[in-house]
Amino acid sequence: MASSNGNNTSTKSNNKRKRSTIKIKKAEQSNKPLDTFSKRKLGLFNKVTELSILCNAKTAMIITSPNGKLYVCGYPNPNTVIKHFLDRENPVIDADKRKQDHEGVVETLRFQHEAIEERLKEENNYLEGVKERNKSSSCFSCWWGHSIDDMALESLEQFKTSLVKLKLNLDASLQGKNIHITTQS
């Protein structure tokens, strides 16, 4: 038993040596910082992804290399997480601002709607007036009611030509209706 205890002790001391942490200090060799950065970066990215998956958290991490390059890691998407963080800077003020903007848009649309309704009423009134004027002064009531004594010779000739055309149109229309009536019988 004594020998097994001795073996156990040596195994424990070996395990302790394997688990010992490395002291953090600045790498002094020229290419050593880049190698160390690459290894540690991958480890950090793995930890960020694990944390996101295990805790159902949204994470984003930005790292700058010794060369000045940026590396980004995040879950589900680093850009989405960063945008969400930046947009949420002051949610109370943002919500109030959005509400005010919405109310302003609604108010503007209401004014536009009222203006359009007013224009529509004016147009309807104008059209009603035109209809009334046309009813009261239709061409059928005015052409035979006026005297031809005051007309000039040129106007009388145009008037006669119009009447001849009207007679021809009426005759043609009447003949068309008579033909239509006789074919139906």
Image (cartoon, rainbow, N blue to C red):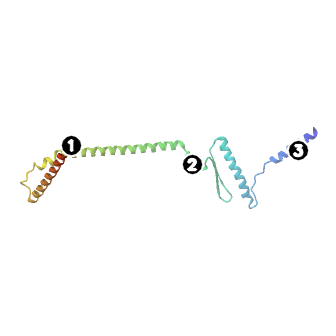
Mark 2 in CB contact with mark 3 (< 8 angstroms): no
Report the quarter where the C terminus lies: top left
Q: Is residue 156 above or below residue 131?
A: below
Q: Are marks 2 and 1 in contact (CB under 8 Å)?
A: no
* Element assignment for label 1: helix
- Mark 2, secondary structure of its residue: helix
The label number, if any, that marks residue 18 in the structure image: none
Quadrant the N terminus occupies: top right
The kind of secondary structure element at disc 3 is helix
Percent of width and height locating residue 163: 12, 53
Label 2 – label 1 distance at C-alpha: 80 Å
Q: Amino acid at mark 3?
A: Ser
Give the CA separation, mark 2 to mark 3: 53 Å
The amino acid pointed to by label 1 is Gln
The image quarter in which residue 114 lies: top left
Q: What residue does disc 1 label? A: 184
Look at mark 2 in the image and give the residue it sits on. Answer: 83
Q: Which residue is mark 3?
A: 10
The picture places residue 119, in percent across and down from the top left corner, at 30, 46
Q: Earlier in the sequence, mark 2 or mark 1?
A: 2
Q: Which one is nearer the viewer's eye here, 159 or 91? A: 159
Mark 2 vs mark 1: in front = 1
Residue at the location (42% across, 45% down)? 105
Disc 2 crowd rating (10 Å Cα; few below 14, some 14-19, many 20+) is few
Q: Residue at x 90, y 42 (%)?
A: 7
Residue 59 location (% of width, % of height): 63, 46
Image location of residue 76, percent across then percent down: 61, 46
Question: Along the polypeptide, which appears first: circle 2 or circle 3?
Answer: 3
Alpha-carbon distance for marks 3 and 1? 124 Å
Residue type, label 2: Lys
